[in-house]
Amino acid sequence: DIQMTQSPSTVSASIGDRVNITCRASQTIAVWLAWYQHKPGQAPNLLIYRASLLQGGVPSRFRGSGSGTEFTLTINSLQPDDFATYYCQQYDSYPITFGQGTRLDI
Amino acid sequence: QVQLVESGGGVVHPGRSLRLSCAASGFIFDNYEMHWVRQSPGKGLEWVSMISHDGNTKKYAEFVEGRVTISRDNSKNTLFLQVDSLRIEDTAVFYCARGLSGSLFYFDYWGQGTLLTVSS
């Protein structure tokens, strides 16, 4: 199985800050990586797919980058609605696996 | 608009069985692969199972293989997950999700989830 490791596990930031979340795969996954935002009691929300492509309707302050084994989600100019848990997901091979999550706190 | 609505969760004793459902609307259901993903209390997201658009191909995570059966009824736009021999550690919110293909699948729409609690 491909292990996905996110860092940090928790990050504290303020409105207007820039935040970087890293996701590392235990083996190369090319660009087959997605990022999700998840708030308690809600459905997860797709932000980025194919490592860097922005899902329709997602604000442009979200940016994905990377390939191979190392990936980054950057959130520019944090807004109040951005405080949530973020997950990466590899879809290179079965079983599909997620990172353990990064909680973004105020 | 695309909607996925899960149902069928509840409190169940260990060893029993349960079938979860996911009603889909707002898109052509039989054009898409569908998936179940779970989140155990205090933990992250875990992919559980996938079924192809025509129901002919099914995949399972190793931790549920042999106890879970995924199925779909394209005439009723509904996805199912049968879970047998329930264990305490099966307690989770179960989400259904629509898959879009790359190498495998990522998920562009998710339901709100249904909570399964396994407890004696």
Image (cartoon, rainbow, N blue to C red):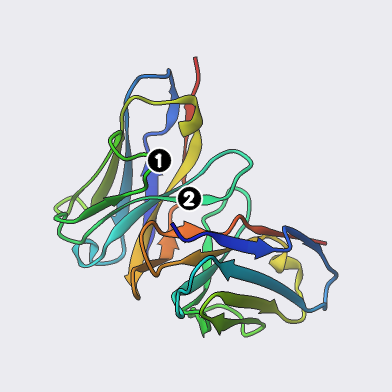
Q: Is residue B22 above or below residue A15?
A: above
Cα distance, mark 1 to mark 2? 10 Å
The residue singled out by tag 2 in the image is B46
Extreme-top residue of the structure? B120
Q: Nearer the viewer, residue A31 or A58?
A: A31
Check disc 1 and report its element: helix, strand or loop. Answer: loop
Q: Position of residue A101 (x, y in %)?
A: 63, 57
Mark 1 neighbour class, 10 Å CA radius: few under 14, some 14 to 19, many 20 or more = few
Q: Earlier in the sequence, mark 1 or mark 2?
A: 2
Seen in the image, is B77 located left or right of residue A97? Answer: left
Q: Is residue A23 above or below residue B49?
A: below
Seen in the image, is B54 located left or right of residue B101? Answer: left
Do residues under tags 1 and 2 come within 8 Å of each other at their CB atoms?
yes
Mark 2 neighbour class, 10 Å CA radius: few under 14, some 14 to 19, many 20 or more = many
Chain at tag 1: B
The residue drawn where x is 40% and y is 40% is: B63
- Callout 2, which amino acid? Glu
* Quarter-of-image position of residue A84: bottom right
The residue singled out by tag 1 in the image is B63
Number of numbered tags placed on the structure image:
2
- Callout 1, which amino acid? Phe
Q: Position of residue A103 (x, y in %)?
A: 71, 58
Q: Position of residue A85 (x, y in %)?
A: 66, 59
Seen in the image, is A20 located left or right of residue A24? Answer: right
Q: Position of residue A61 (x, y in %)?
A: 67, 83
The residue drawn where x is 27% and y is 48% is: B79
